[in-house]
Image (cartoon, rainbow, N blue to C red):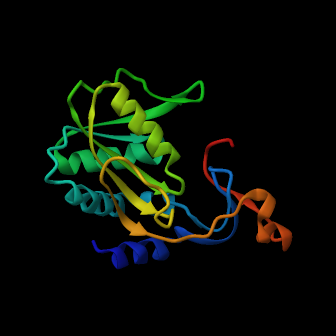
C-alpha cells in the first residue's frame, strides 16, 4: 500500500475526524485519527500490517512489540507477516513494562510498532523497555505519524501515513478561545 491508499482507507472508514480534540498528550487539535475505525476491520488491519512488515523485512526481526491497546493488534499482525513472536507492553503503576511473562532476550532483534504518533512519548517508553531488557531495536513502524516530523527516535522509523496536524497547548488554543466544544478521545487519563 502506498501513502495515498493508506490515507484513502482512513478517510473511507471515518478514521480521520475534524473538530476540537483533547489528545492523550494533553495537547488540543483540530484533527483526530481514530485508528479503531480502521482496525475494527480485520482485513484492513492485515493489509496495513503487511505493508508495515514489508518496510522492515530485511531487518531480521525476531520479536515485534507494541504498546497496549492498538499496539497489541499491530504487533500480532506484523509479527504474523514477519513470522516472529509478538508481544506488548502495558502500564503498571504509571510505568510502561512487560507483563504476562513476556521477555525480550538480550541481543534479540526487536521491531517496535505503534498506531498513531503525536509526540512519540509512548514509543520512547517502549524503546526504553526494549533497551532495559537488552534487546536490539532495529526499527519503529507506525501506521500514522501525525507529528509533522517532530517525533524523532534513535533508531530508524517509518510510517505508512505522514500527516502534519496542528496542535495547541491548552492555554493557547484558538479552538477553546472560539468556544468550539472539545471532545476527549483515547483511552489514557491525562
Does residue 129 lie above or below 137 as drawn?
above
Q: Position of residue 146 (x, y in %)?
A: 50, 64
Tell me the quarter of the image containing the C terminus.
Answer: top right
Q: Residue at x 62, y 50 (%)?
A: 25
Q: Position of residue 79 (x, y in %)?
A: 24, 45
**In which quadrant of the rendered view does residue 85 lie?**
top left
* Of the pair 76 and 179, the residue shown nearer to us: 179
Q: Residue at x 14, y 44 (%)?
A: 60
Does residue 80 lie above or below 37 as drawn?
above
Q: Residue at x 35, y 32 (%)?
A: 130
Q: How many numbered tags mark residues here?
A: 0
Q: Is residue 73 left or right of residue 26?
A: left
Q: Is residue 11 left or right of residue 133?
A: right
Farthest residue toward the top?
101
Does residue 23 lie above or below 175 as drawn?
above
Q: Position of residue 31 (x, y in %)?
A: 61, 69
Tell me the quarter of the image containing the N terminus.
Answer: bottom left
Q: Residue at x 23, y 59 (%)?
A: 55
Amino acid at each position: 500500500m502506498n501513502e495515498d491508499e493508506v490515507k484513502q482507507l482512513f478517510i473511507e472508514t471515518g478514521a480521520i475526524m475534524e473538530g476540537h480534540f483533547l489528545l492523550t498528550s494533553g495537547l488540543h487539535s483540530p484533527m483526530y485519527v481514530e485508528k479503531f475505525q480502521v482496525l475494527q476491520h480485520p482485513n484492513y488491519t492485515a493489509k496495513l500490517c503487511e505493508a508495515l512488515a514489508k518496510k522492515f523485512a530485511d531487518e531480521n526481526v525476531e520479536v515485534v512489540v507494541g504498546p497496549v491497546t492498538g499496539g497489541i493488534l499491530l504487533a500480532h499482525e506484523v509479527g504474523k507477516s514477519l513470522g516472529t513472536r509478538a508481544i506488548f507492553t502495558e502500564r503498571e503503576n504509571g510505568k510502561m513494562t512487560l507483563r504476562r511473562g513476556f521477555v525480550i532476550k538480550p541481543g534479540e532483534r526487536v521491531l517496535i510498532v505503534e498506531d498513531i504518533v503525536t509526540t512519540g512519548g509512548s514509543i520512547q517508553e517502549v524503546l526504553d523497555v526494549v533497551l532495559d531488557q537488552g534487546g536490539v531495536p532495529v526499527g519503529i513502524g507506525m501506521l500514522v505519524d501525525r507529528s509533522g516530523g517532530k517525533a524523532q527516535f534513535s533508531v530508524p522509523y517509518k510510517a505508512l501515513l505522514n500527516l502534519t496536524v496542528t496542535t495547541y497547548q491548552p492555554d493557547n488554543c484558538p479552538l477553546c478561545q472560539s468556544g468550539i466544544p472539545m471532545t476527549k478521545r483515547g483511552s489514557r487519563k491525562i
